[in-house]
Amino acid sequence: MAHYLQLIISCISLLFLILLVPTNSENTTTTFTKPHPSGFLENLEGCKKGETLAGIRELKKYLNKFGYLNYHSSKAHDNDEFDDFLEAAMKTYQANFNLNVTGTLDSETISKMAMPRCGVPDIVNGTNTMRINKKRHHHHTSRKNLHTVSHYTFFPGSPTPRWPVGKTTLTYWFDETTPSDAKPAFVRAFNRWASVTQYFSFSETQYYDSSDLTIGFASGDHGDGHPFDGPGRVLAHAFKPTDGRLHCDADESFSIGAIPNSNYIDLVSVAMHEIGHLLGLGHSSVENALMYPTTRPGVSTDIQYDDLEGMRALYNF
Ligand SMILES: *[C@@H]1O[C@H](CO)[C@@H](O)[C@H](O)[C@H]1NC(C)=O
Ligand SMILES: [Zn+2]
Ligand SMILES: [Zn+2]
């Protein structure tokens, strides 16, 4: 009888094991699996101008990192006072992410801030990249029932940072920090950009000296002035043309392809977003656009109409 029971338990365990093995061969996870931090800013829910609460300096640090706080002294934001600057920064953030512009830290704003996102600031040198081009490039395309508003943006600068005319073939180089099982994600992402744009083509090179783009993985401070933050929140960042650097946060749990209902971030989608930056796109306030700053675990994002329109406008193809 006891043996019988043991056999049944073994069978059940085996069944569970079979169910747990991913069946989609396209989706393979890399080796980093660290827990995501929770409770970010939650104790500050409802705080607003005039209040002083322990932890407000974390809110300031967050907004400062993405360009929203523009204090003249870096020490000015190292305190827990909810001042006028912070309220203005909150409102800009809320407008960029299509939240209610209240200036108070409501639960929707906290949820948005807790989401995994790209490390490239939304405001660069005082220019709100998520809004400025909204006015300059507010395209209304009417084609039968199609009515689309584009919100793609570029990096600020004159001339607008882009790859030179005629430079349509770009080579990329993986540095020694890139896990070998992460490389196929980038190959897929480059192929996608090539096939959608029909303008750029990409190929891997083994030689750093002749590469246009470089890809690497790093933890925390890695020498470019934009330290990563451990598991969660900032996933990756990339530089404007023609810098070519793309870095992923090595502390994230990445998968190659989305694994629905998991805590894994799809590296293919992250790579496509960051390649968008390498090619000259800034952040978009269109929520389903590839260049929208935030993402979620277990989902994949693709190049959308908004992103392609941005590329067409930047490169005239
Ligand atoms: C905005 O405020 C309204 C009314 O209070 C609320 O119903 C809605 O959920 C809010 N939307 C967001 C995105 O916060
Ligand atoms: Zn980005
Ligand atoms: Zn970096």
Image (spheres, helix red, strand yellow):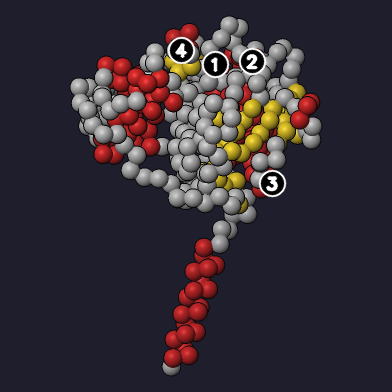
Residue 176, how many percent across, how many down?
70, 40
Picture quadrant where residue 84 is located: top left
Taking depth in this image into account, of 148 and 158 the one nearest to the observer is: 158
Q: Do the CB atoms of the residues marked 3 and 4 lie less than 8 Å apart?
A: no
Q: Which residue lies most toward the left here?
A: 50
Q: Which residue lies most toward the front here?
A: 75
Residue at the image position 50 percent from the left and 84 percent from the top:
7
Q: Which residue is mark 1?
A: 154
Q: CA distance from mark 3 to mark 2?
A: 29 Å
Q: Is mark 2 within 8 Å of ligand 2?
A: no
Dot 4, how many residues are within 10 Å of its Cα: few (below 14), some (14-19), or many (20+)?
some
Kind of residue at badge 2: Arg
Kind of residue at badge 1: Phe
* Element type where label 4 sits in the image: strand
Q: Which mark is residue 162?
A: 2
Q: Do the CB atoms of the residues marked 2 and 4 lie less than 8 Å apart?
A: no
Dot 1, how many residues are within 10 Å of its Cα: few (below 14), some (14-19), or many (20+)?
many
Residue at the image position 33 percent from the left and 43 percent from the top:
39
Q: Do the CB atoms of the residues marked 3 and 2 lie less than 8 Å apart?
A: no
Q: Is residue 73 left or right of residue 218?
A: left
Q: CA distance from mark 3 to mark 1?
A: 32 Å
Q: Which residue is mark 3?
A: 180
- Tell me which label, 3 or 4, sits earlier in the chain: 4
- Tell me which label, 3 or 2, sits earlier in the chain: 2
